[in-house]
Amino acid sequence: MYDKLLKPRQSLRITMYFIYIYIIIIIIKRQPLGRPRRRWEDNIKMDLQEVGCEGMNWIGLDQDKDRWRALVNAVMNLRVP
């Protein structure tokens, strides 16, 4: 309806403006606000730093149930006052 009233260049300009706004809204929506969320892996790495085992391969450590349980207990004991 309004396209008939507008000149072709104005119609194109308005269309491009709406496309630009739509793209900006999509980009802004995809970016979460605030600091990045902490992942489970990040928590494990921080716990290893607290215990003093920073260079340890924790992915291989979790395959050994007894050593993993000992590490988890050591970290939990540090957090209890």
Image: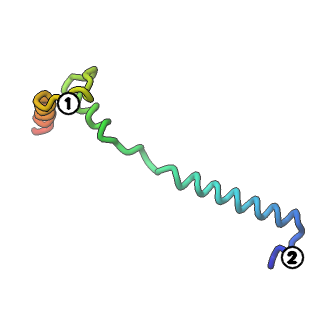
Name the outermost residue toward the front: 63
Image quarter in which the N terminus is found: bottom right
Left/right placement of residue 29 relative to residue 72 reads right
Which residue is more in the foreground, 64 or 35?
Answer: 64
Q: Can you tell which of label 1 and label 2 is closer to the viewer? A: 1
Which residue is more in the foreground, 48 or 81?
Answer: 48
Name above or below for residue 17 compared with residue 62: below
Name above or below for residue 5 compared with residue 22: below
Image quarter in which the C terminus is found: top left
Can you give x and y, in whole percent of width and height, for residue 9 in the image? 88, 63
Q: Do the residues labelled 1 and 2 touch (CB within 8 Å)?
A: no
Can you give x and y, in whole percent of width and height, for residue 12 in the image? 82, 62
Please tell me which residue is depicted at 15% across the width and 31% down the height of the picture. Answer: 68
Name the outermost residue toward the right: 7
Which residue is more in the foreground, 68 or 26?
Answer: 68
For mark 2, what is the residue? 4
Indicate the secondary structure of the residue bearing disc 2.
Answer: helix
Instruction: Give the mark nearest the N terminus, 1 or 2.
Output: 2
Please tell me which residue is depicted at 11% across the width and 34% down the height of the picture. Answer: 73
Which amino acid does the dot numbered 2 rest on? Lys
Q: How is the image coloured?
A: rainbow
Crowding at label 2, few (<14), some or many (≥20) Cα neighbours within 10 Å?
A: few
Crowding at label 1, few (<14), some or many (≥20) Cα neighbours within 10 Å?
A: few
Can you give x and y, in whole percent of width and height, for residue 6 in the image? 86, 72
Left/right placement of residue 23 relative to residue 4 reads left
Can residue 78 be seen here? no
Question: Which of the numbered marks, if any, corresponds to residue 77?
Answer: none
Q: How far apart are marks 1 and 2 (CA)?
A: 70 Å
For mark 1, what is the residue? 63
Please tell me which residue is depicted at 89% across the width and 69% down the height of the picture. Answer: 7
